[in-house]
């Protein structure tokens, strides 16, 4: 894709991930040193690197934990929490994975802004708040008036996932804020938009 973009002077916007980091330091800035701990993170970093050496006009937008108004395909985290608890199912949520979950509309606006203002290079795009997946879940529970007693606190090793995850992660968005006015939507407002547009 980078080669194709370079051949026709197209601006290629690549969506990358905080999984290029090891999750030790947390709250990563664009200049922090990547050190992926799993295969997915390595492929995302390889994609970034291929683009950087391609001579194409590119923007890399790194983001994390996307959620929002999605009408087809698999459920995002917010809808999974809402639907599972409404069905009366118990859910197990980790307290030791920290991110700043990103509302899709904010990412879409950022894509549009980098195209409009011709901003190239690497930018972080994340939500306003850094919090654990458990705390994020409890914010969803409170907003959608769900039964919080169905949420069990666990830690990542309890999940016995085959791939290692970066734990203390998340992306600082100051660069995008100062260079093109990125302004993430307040969390409860994102839930309100989902409630209204998805009827959940
Ligand atoms: N989700 C997150 O929290 C998150 C966080 C950071 C970065 N990202 C990055 O954001 C991007 C999208 O992630 P996602 O979570 O939205 O993934 P997703 O839900 O799996 O969506 C992937 C999309 O890519 C399409 N696709 C997959 N393989 C394709 C192929 N060979 N040719 C053409 N289209 C193909 C799929 O089409 P179909 O619908 O037809 O299958 C689908 O629409 C990825 O690059 C991911 O690394 C995601």
Image (tube, rainbow, N blue to C red):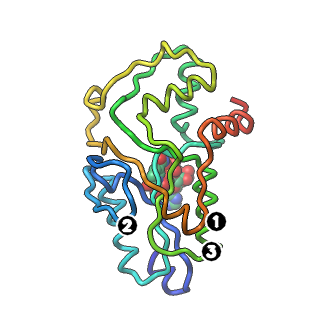
Residue bearing the label numbered 2 = 47
The image position of residue 30, as x and y in percent, is 39, 63
Residues at circles 1 and 3 in contact by the CB criterion of under 8 Å: no
Quadrant in which residue 160 is drawn: top left
Q: Position of residue 20 (x, y in %)?
A: 33, 56
**Residue in the picture at 51% in, 16% down:** 148
Q: Which of labels 1 and 3 is toward the front?
A: 3
Identify the secondary structure beneath mark 2: helix
Q: At 38% across and 76% down in the image, what residue appears?
A: 52
Q: Which residue is mark 1?
A: 112
Say what secondary structure mark 3 lies in. loop
Q: Mark 2 or mark 1: which comes first in sequence?
A: 2
Q: Earlier in the sequence, mark 2 or mark 3?
A: 2
Looking at the figure, which quarter contains the C terminus?
A: top right
Q: Is residue 57 or residue 89 the one in the foreground? A: 57
Q: How many marks?
A: 3
Q: Quadrant of residue 42?
A: bottom left
As drawn, 80 above or below 66: above
Q: Residues within 10 Å of mark 2 (few under 14, many from 20)?
A: some
In this picture, residue 164 sits left or right of residue 86: left
* Circle 3 residues within 10 Å: few <14, some 14–19, many ≥20: few
Residue 36 sits in quarter:
bottom left
What residue is shown at x 63% (from left), y 19% (from top)?
145
Query: Which residue is pictured at 37% across the width and 21% down the height?
Result: 153
Residue behind label 2 places its C-beta within 8 angstroms of ligand 1: yes
């Amino acid at each position: 894709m980078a080669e194709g973009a370079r051949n026709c002077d197209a601006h290629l916007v690549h969506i990358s991930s905080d999984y290029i980091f090891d999750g030790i330091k947390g709250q990563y800035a664009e200049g922090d040193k990547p050190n992926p701990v799993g295969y997915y993170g390595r492929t995302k970093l390889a994609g970034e690197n291929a683009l950087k050496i391609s001579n194409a006009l590119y923007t890399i937008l790194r983001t994390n934990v996307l959620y929002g108004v999605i009408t087809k395909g698999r459920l995002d985290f917010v809808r999974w929490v809402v639907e599972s608890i409404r069905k009366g199912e118990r859910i197990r949520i980790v307290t030791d994975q920290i991110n700043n979950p990103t509302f899709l509309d904010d990412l879409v606006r950022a894509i549009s802004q980098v195209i409009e203002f011709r901003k190239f290079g690497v930018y972080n795009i994340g939500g306003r708040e850094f919090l654990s997946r458990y705390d994020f879940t409890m914010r969803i529970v409170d907003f959608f008036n769900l039964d919080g007693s169905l949420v069990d606190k666990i830690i990542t090793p309890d999940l016995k996932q085959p791939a290692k995850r970066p734990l203390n992660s998340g992306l600082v968005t100051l660069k995008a804020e100062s260079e093109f006015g990125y302004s993430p939507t307040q969390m409860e407002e994102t839930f309100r938009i989902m409630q209204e547009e998805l009827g959940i």
